[in-house]
Amino acid sequence: MLSIDLHQRSGNAVSRRELLQVGAVGLLGLNLPDVLSYKARAQSAASRVPGFGRAESLIFLYLQGSPSHIDVWDPKPDAPVEYRGEFEPIVTTVPGMILSETLPRLAQQAQRFTLVRSLGVKPRGLTNHGAAIYMLMTGYDPSNFSPTGLAVPPSREDLPSIGSLVARYRPTDRGAMSYVALGGPVREGSVTGVGQFAGVLGGAYHPYQMYDDATGPLRLESLTLPPDITLGRLQARIDLRSRLRSINLGPADFDGYYQQAFSLLESARAARAFRLDLEATSMRESYGRTKFGQSCLLARRLIERGSRFVQVNWPAGSDTEPVAGPDGSWDTHRNNFPMLRDWRCPVFDRALAALLEDLSARGLLERTLVVAIGEFGRSPRIGAPTTNNVGPGGRDHWPACYTCLLAGGGVPGGQVYGASDRHGAYPERQPVHPYDLLATLYHALGIDCDTMYRDHLNRPRRIVEHGNVMPGLF
């Protein structure tokens, strides 16, 4: 009997198709060469779909709190005023593509990105931030939330985040960071870290978190050795831990976690990536001297030095009251228009436009996929009274329809994928489930979206609960 261990493989994992094929060998009377032939064909199936493996790395810009898609990148100039809002549309460098007047810099970069305007989902449970974040970050419907729909603290039994899965199935070279989280922690209410960690995969696939304010000096103690510890002495300690593990005297995470930490300390690449003081003043200014802007610059530096997945979180939590200032929330239940016009959009527009231009100038954009997205959109009708406490000039949560931006990594620029209806309320053409988007991101990175891992009950899990690569995107 041929058995395949889904949990231990660290390279190309086993897909559901492979399991079905291997399970059928007894019925079909196939011998081992036949099985291996089937397996090779299964592994190559995804590569025949356009775009497979075109991206070597991914920068995931997560706009927690969620911007209004209508007021940012899917304007509705012909809708009634109570839907279209205060902002005027502007033309871009791509004929027929319009943006809100709040994004003048990105309008000049339109040839470099694609807008997906037909994302939408009917979430299981409440339409709150936590459930939507969990879906976006893990590719699964929420199952570990309180009866009232609120997030619970992360645990070892959670399903892994997209960054953790990428770190496992597309590991980096020794000395580079696989999964890094910047900007600010993901927060929903009093809970920090929704959908951010490795869960059942183990601590070796957690992100390296750097949430210091990147406008100032960063603390890099974790990437340097204490004066009284040498690399040889540290390796000896790691070897001892490995021996303890071999006789079941240590947690299973020890080996991978400590070897990863050692490789980062051994290499100067990781620490050097965080040296923003090495950048020219003009480059730092182009991104904007804000937490988000400088975190985007850090993301470019990390990708340059071999990181696979860098997540830049907007600094404010998902359900934080929107206030004036560069770091305030996108959760605009009230005062949507002055918050976006004066604060949120200028910071975002400057940073993302600079990132795209910078990556392109360095020859990195073709192999780096950039994604900008919130956990959902915002309600088409302004100030409509709902259970989510919408005030004057505000927009509510709206998971039924929203937009994301994709650039680089094999995705052609200058496109609009799908469309929303006349009010921006529901997808009208080429609907995309968030899980389709995640399947597409994995595909671009060369990871078959049928790849399986095991959860805490030893059940096989697809890396995305359901969904497929977006047809016609690449």
Image (cartoon, rainbow, N blue to C red):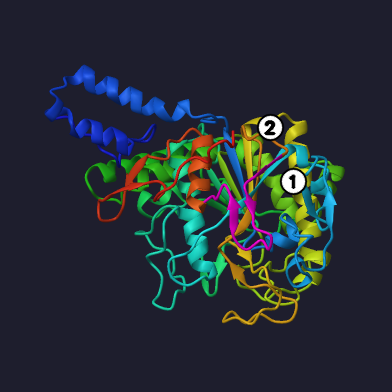
Relative image position of residue 425 (x, y in whole percent): 62, 63
Q: Nearer the viewer, residue 326 or 382?
A: 382
Above or below for 320 versus 44: below
Q: Please say whether residue 274 is visible from this viewpoint.
A: no
The residue range painted magenta reads 415-432
Q: The C terminus appears in which quarter of the rendering? A: top right
Q: Residues within 10 Å of mark 2 (few under 14, many from 20)?
A: many
Relative image position of residue 443 (x, y in whole percent): 49, 36
Residue 424 sits inside the magenta stretch: yes
Q: Please give the residue where the numbered disc 2 appears in the rendered image.
A: 364
Relative image position of residue 127 (x, y in whole percent): 51, 70
Q: Quadrant of residue 374?
A: bottom right
Residue sitting at 47 percent across and 36 percent down? 171
Mark 2 to mark 1: distance in Å?
Answer: 19 Å
Picture disc at residue 276: 1
* Number of marks: 2
- Disc 2 marks a residue whose amino acid type is Leu
Residue sitting at 69 percent across and 68 percent down? 329
Residue 470 sits inside the magenta stretch: no
Residue sitting at 80 percent across and 51 percent down? 350
Q: Please say whether residue 123 is visible from this viewpoint.
A: yes
